[in-house]
Amino acid sequence: MGRIQLRNVTKSFGDVQVIPPLDLTIEDGEFAVFVGPSGCGKSTLLRMIAGLEDLTSGEIEIDGKIATNVPPAQRGLAMVFQSYALYPHMTVRKNIAFPLRMAKMSKAETDQRVETAAKSLNLMDYLDRKPADLSGGQRQRVAIGRAIVREPSAFLFDEPLSNLDAALRVGMRLEIGELHERLKTTMIYVTHDQVEAMTMANKIIVLRAGVIEQVGSPLELYHKPQNEFVAGFIGSPK
Ligand code: ADP
Ligand code: MG
């Protein structure tokens, strides 16, 4: 589970078309990274996949079913944003459990899932703290925990590390990579950072002004960039 297909998808805001017709398939279990300069449409694409933004035209299929009109909560996806969006008045435990409480899951199963997520993210000692008493990295882990407990068929990350300092970013990249190895769940990860894309992805989707310039593995893009833009973007330091 976790195959995502975009067919002929477009997006306009008013008269401005920010995504011209676009086709893309992300296979089950892939770690796909959308990379491109600020304003190229990465978040818009991710939000359309998540169901947080309507398509102007086209179709999105998730696990073989047309999802275009399926509400976000029923798509089986979990999104992790750059701003952690944790509830400040709730403990870590309650923050992680929140989506399950919304889904009216039993207390026993909720506790079980929260514990599993907390263990896998090294949060067991922090379950009774509030977000204000956590470091940036711990907060981001709580946000990821809140995604994990839903057992989604895919994770969607929108620049989840851009608020963290450089050292923490490196650590969190490794942790997200390890999570992918372990869960083998599809991950779609948005970043404007070439290094992040090159080190984390199985499949990189390079975007410019809403257009896919190239899709390929990091090595393919590195050795065989299809055009000057990809070559410059992947080759040049940030
Ligand atoms: P990225 O995430 O790659 O930085 P976005 O997807 O946020 O880019 O934005 C793509 C383009 O769409 C930008 O030109 C942005 O200004 C525009 N845009 C995004 N959201 C809206 C909106 N709600 N209304 C109008 N324009 C928008
Ligand atoms: Mg964005």
Image (spheres, grey):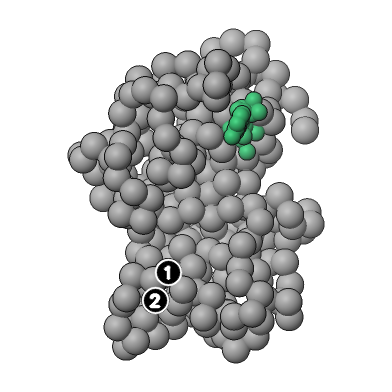
Q: Nearer the viewer, residue 207 or 79?
A: 79
According to the picture, the residue beneath numbered tag 1 turns out to be: 99
Question: Secondary structure under badge 2?
Answer: helix
- Image quadrant, ligand 2: top right
What whole-number distance in Å separates the C-alpha atoms at marks 2 and 1? 5 Å
Q: Position of residue 59 (x, y in %)?
A: 31, 28
| Residue 106 drawn above or below residue 139 | below
- Answer yes or no: is residue 79 visible: yes
| Residue 23 drawn above or below residue 63 | above
Q: Position of residue 233 (x, y in %)?
A: 68, 23
| Residue 83 drawn above or below residue 58 | below
Q: Residue 223, labelled with which disc?
A: none
Q: Residues within 10 Å of mark 2 (few under 14, many from 20)?
A: some
- The residue shown at (75%, 25%) is 236
Q: Amino acid at mark 2?
A: Arg
According to the picture, the residue beneath numbered tag 2 turns out to be: 101
Position of the C terminus by quadrant: top right
- The residue shown at (69%, 31%) is 38
Q: Amino acid at mark 1?
A: Pro
- Answer yes or no: is residue 220 visible: no
Toward which corner of the image does residue 25 lie, by quadrant?
top left
Asked if labels 1 and 2 touch by Cβ distance under 8 angstroms, the answer is yes
Could you tell whether 41 is left or right of 70 in the image?
right
Q: Nearer the viewer, residue 198 or 88?
A: 88
Question: Secondary structure under badge 1?
Answer: helix
Q: Residues within 10 Å of mark 1 (few under 14, many from 20)?
A: some
Q: Position of residue 80 (x, y in %)?
A: 54, 55
- For label 1, being within 8 Å of ligand 2 is answered no
Could you tell whether 170 is left or right of 223 in the image?
right
The residue sitting at the top extreme is 227
Q: Nearer the viewer, residue 9 or 166?
A: 9
- The residue shown at (24%, 43%) is 63
